[in-house]
Image (cartoon, helix red, strand yellow):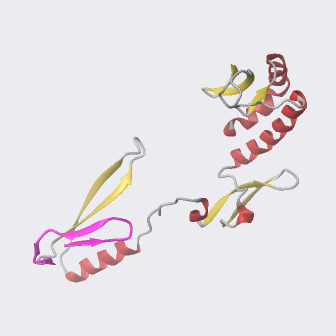
Amino acid sequence: MWMVLDNGARLYGMDCINGRISNYSKLHSIFRYKTEKNKNKVMRTINVEIKTQEERDNLIKELQQMEFKKEVKSWKDLEKVEGYWVDDESDIQYHYDTTDSCNRNFWATEEQAKASIAMAQLSQLMKYYNGDWVADWEDRNQIKYTLHLDKNKIGRHATRDINEFLTFKTSEIRDTFLENHRDLIEQAKPLL
């Protein structure tokens, strides 16, 4: 006999006759979970000795009350979010709230919120350095000069089609930008 719980775990009795548990001595539950090492789905069996129907009923009740991660297909499915946001004075604030439209600016970590301030500053500085020039990522003939992370180190690159946030119209502008704003780029690393 299989009893399917909300989380996909299955409860079954080992000694079944005509779909009924004839002996309450054994009850197994199987849970799917992801291992931290390889993130692959594996099966885990837990053996529980049950001596009475009351013990069985109590175990079933406990298992049914267990909370499991639900499938999240959209941001709204999270229902509640906690994290950090940048206020109008560029200070980092912690908050916990629902996934209402007014709470879409929460970063998962304080480090990411701080990096978002650096990204905003870099965006304004790039606009100044590049003038009216904007990278045309559809134009493979246009060479773009970029700064990117390679093994968490700031690298320089010339590309025609690899999009990067830090993109410049000449290698000289890119190199000067890096020289003048390395500290700000380092602060932005969590989001680059």
- Quadrant in the picture for residue 186: top right
Q: Is residue 150 above or below residue 94?
A: above
Residue positioned 90% across, 30% down in the render? 131
Classify residue 176 as left or right of residue 156. Answer: right
Residue visible at 83% across and 56% down?
Answer: 87
Q: Residue furthest top?
A: 172
User: Which of 17/174 is in front?
Assistant: 174
Q: Is 19 in the magenta?
A: yes
What residue is drawn where x is 76% and y is 44%?
116
Q: Position of residue 167 (x, y in %)?
A: 76, 28
Q: Position of residue 54 (x, y in %)?
A: 24, 83
Left or right of residue 49: residue 187: right
Position of the C terminus by quadrant: top right
Start-end of magenta stretch: 1-21
Residue pushed farthest left?
17
Q: In this rendering, would 99 be left or right of 89?
A: left
Q: Quadrant of residue 14?
A: bottom left
**Up-down relation of residue 108 to residue 58 (above or below):** above
At a point 74% along the width and 22% down the height, the residue shown is: 142
Residue 116 is a magenta residue: no
Q: Position of residue 117 (x, y in %)?
A: 80, 44
Q: Nearer the viewer, residue 107 or 63?
A: 107
> Left or right of 90: which side holds 64?
left
Q: Find residue 105 and report its horizontal and vertical position in percent.
A: 73, 56
